[in-house]
Image: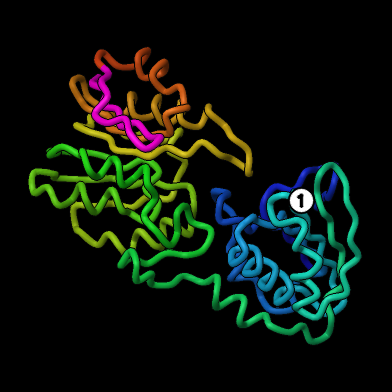
Amino acid sequence: MTEAVYGAPPLELATSGADAIQVSPLVLGAASIEALEDRSLARMIVAAPPGVLERRYALAHALRALAPDGELIALAPKTRGGSRLGQELRSFGCDAAESGRRHHRICVIRRPAKPSGLAEAIAAGAPQFVEALQLWSQPGVFSWDQLDEGTSKLLAVLPPLAGRGADLGCGLGVLSLAVLRNAAVTELTAIDIDRRAVEAARRNVTNERARIVHGDVRQTALSGLDFVVMNPPFHAGGREDRDLGAGFIAAAARALRRGGRCLLVANVALPYEAPLGSAFRQVRTLDRSGGYKVLEAVL
């Protein structure tokens, strides 16, 4: 029997074996939780995500993949879904032993012979076409079922673009689709670390000038580009991480040619002017409203 782990549970709260299979869609090189065979695991640890549909989807797949009487350890911060873990596991027919430690709720269960409601939870959290966006998406992807306000701000002032470019942290491909409406754009590379976002973007962005890449923006080997667009993330593992945005800015600077442009949107509270000023010759604000700022930087 095999062991699997979903996400990055705090080591002091739940420890997986050295041979455990990682199945988080946010970890490059990880296996797919969907591809785990039914009743194939003896043990699984799930660092449960905060979104209800995403969390129930992961828990349902974990229970599907566990052998009868296999052990599931599910945990989450109390304020990010942990308070609902026990109730959700009981809704699947599990007898959950709950405990609390380091602001987390931790549930330990043995898989029942016939858990209930798995198919419904998996269907609700699966890839789906979102009418409001007219795009393919999946719960757990950034702004999965609506256009986020930051991206909307950038779209409103996005100038005509031309040549070779990149969409760093492309998500579902909203910015990529807007960029590719410019006939003068000859090539666009869209990159995201979330496997679910990449799979959705490949369905959404079918233009032959686009290339969708599953990878870490901060490790990109792109060079000589004319432009970069991005709405960089500033959370990792549920915590604010301002270094993420700085890493995206550094990647953009490495990818651009002299005179190339970086267009980004960010929350007004994020101090991106400093790393932009260090890496680029010119920085100007295209819009500052509604708690967001759209910045243009020229290398």
The residue shown at (63%, 43%) is 237
Image spot of residue 16 (x, y percent): 80, 52
Residue type at mark 1: give it.
Answer: Lys
Q: Which SS type dominates the magenta stretch?
A: strand
Q: In the displayed structure, would residue 31 be above or below residue 40? A: above
At x 34%, y 67%, the residue is 132
Q: Residue furthest front?
A: 290
Q: In the image, is residue 205 part of the stretch drawn in magenta?
A: no
- Please tell me in which quadrant of the rendered image residue 43 appears: bottom right
Q: Is residue 203 visible?
A: no
Q: Quadrant of the C terminus?
A: top left
Name of the residue lying farthest toward the left? 184
User: Residue 38: percent from the left, percent from the top?
Assistant: 69, 79
Q: Is residue 285 magenta?
A: yes
Placement of the N terminus among the 4 image quadrants: bottom right
Residue 291, given in percent of the width and then of the height, sits at 41, 35
80 over 225 or under it: above or below:
below
In the image, the segment drawn in magenta is 283-299
Along the line of sight, which residue is nearer the eye, 242 or 222?
A: 242
Which residue occupies 20% across, 59% down?
A: 207
62 sits left or right of 101 in the view: left
As drawn, 146 above or below 220: below
Q: Residue 116 appears at what percent x and percent y?
A: 73, 84
Residue 147 visible (yes or no): yes
Residue under pointer 1: 78
